[in-house]
Image: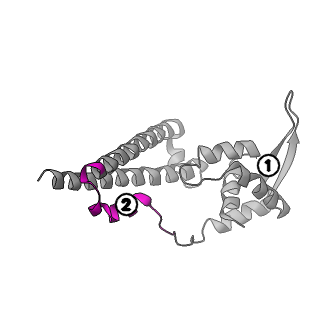
Amino acid sequence: MKTLGYAILGLLAQESLSGYDLTQLMKGRVGNFWSARHSQIYPELARLEDGGYVTHRVVEQRERPDKKVYEITAEGLSALREWVTQPPPPNVPRDELVLKAYSVWLADPEKAARLFREEALRHKEQLAHYEEMRTWMERERGEDVRRADSPWFAGYAALRRGIIYERGYEEWCNWVADQLEKYMHP
């Protein structure tokens, strides 16, 4: 099964969803750490259904076409439980800004410093967004965010990873910009 299949199963383990709902969650709740296009989700749902990992029911709607609402099966839940404890394949690092930093010694220091300050600001803004989400989760879900058997814990754990990432990336961008600015104005 593709990793996207497990991402879909993870969402369906929490609630029954339509393909449209899954697409929206891939843009929102899950989109901060995993992405998939609309055109990828529906074929993957078909593969999951063919494999017995999900099933669907048709929901009639007024003034709209009927929609399929998907649910995870016992087999899907079992596959997800097994997958979640398996080590992931190694990440292939690809970070264009780090690649630019590798050659920044060739750049105009003022332009380069500006680029890194802008990137730091972008990460600072994302960090602020994540911190707002953290505050909301802790206020609205209380201890559920710390209970390892809660779906809220899973979202909270992913959010904490995002917070650490954004904080570190912002710090690194500012450090690079500081070094470039020191060079410009010794």
Callout count? 2
Q: Which badge, 1 or 2, is on the more N-terminal residue?
A: 1
Q: Please, what is the dominant secondary structure of the magenta stretch? A: helix
Of badges 1 and 2, the one in the foreground is: 2
Using the image as rendered, state which of residue 136 and residue 5 is in the foreground.
Answer: 5
Using the image as rendered, state which of residue 117 and residue 53 is in the foreground.
Answer: 117
Give the percent coordinates (x, y) of residue 162: 46, 51
Say which residue label 2 marks: 100
Say which residue label 1 marks: 70
Using the image as rendered, state which of residue 177 and residue 13 is in the foreground.
Answer: 177
**Relative vertical location of residue 35 with respect to residue 98 in this rendering, above or below:** above
Give the percent coordinates (x, y) of residue 106: 28, 62
Q: Amino acid at mark 1?
A: Tyr
User: Could you tell me which secondary element the residue under label 2 belongs to?
Assistant: helix
**Relative vertical location of residue 49 with respect to residue 125 in this rendering, above or below:** below
Which residue lies at the image location 55% right of the left edge and 55% below the top edge?
148
